[in-house]
Image (cartoon, grey):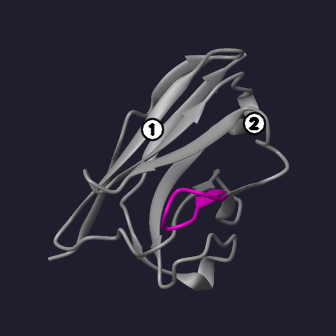
Amino acid sequence: QVQLVESGGGLAQAGGSLRLSCAASGRTFSSNAMGWFRQAPGKEREFVASIHWSGGSTLSAASVKGRFTISRDNNKNTVDLQMNSLKPEDTAVYYCAAATGPVATEYLIDYDYWGQGTQVTVSS
């Protein structure tokens, strides 16, 4: 059974940092792009960041560029999201996802495996 399990969410103050991790099991995703999305209450799920299968290229949403960094370790089958300079508007459930192809992508339709999500709450 393929699973993506997120960890590292929690409560942070504005200006603080959190690091999310996603561990994949059941199959390897070393040939697939991976991504992070988030969904705030009452809002659509939105793209945060994505990373190429090799880790050599990334995409980030404008709202997090310069503050969030996505990385991966194909040997460990993991993908991380380092979040710095957090803002209250970053509060959301964060989801890890595996894309069907190797190229980083911001489109939900390109992802076919999803984790259950981890809550991130940023207080002002």
Which is more toward the observer, 67 or 16?
Answer: 67
Labels in figure, total: 2
Q: Which residue is mark 1?
A: 20
**Alpha-carbon span between mark 2 and mark 1:** 17 Å
Please tell me whether mark 1 sits on a helix, a strand or a loop: strand
Q: Residue at x 73, y 16 (%)?
A: 124
Q: Quadrant of the N terminus?
A: bottom left
Q: Image quarter for residue 82?
A: top right
Name the spot of residue 72 as percent of width and height, x first.
44, 50
Q: Residue at x 53, y 56 (%)?
A: 55
The 10 Å Cα crowd at callout 1, few under 14, some 14 to 19, many 20 or more, is many
Q: Main secondary structure of the magenta part?
A: loop
In the rendered structure, find residue 89 and report the number of the disc placed on it: 2
Please tell me whether mark 2 sits on a helix, a strand or a loop: helix
Q: Amino acid at mark 1?
A: Leu
Name the spot of residue 42 as percent of width and height, x first.
69, 58
Given this view, does label 2 or label 1 mark the residue nearer the observer? Answer: 1
Name the spot of residue 111 as percent of width and height, x first.
51, 79
Is residue 90 one of those drawn in magenta? no
Q: Which residues are magenta?
A: 49-57
Sequence-earlier tag: 2 or 1:
1
Q: Is 95 on the left-hand or right-hand side of 45?
A: left
Q: Residue at x 57, y 30 (%)?
A: 121
Q: Is 28 on the left-hand or right-hand side of 21?
A: left
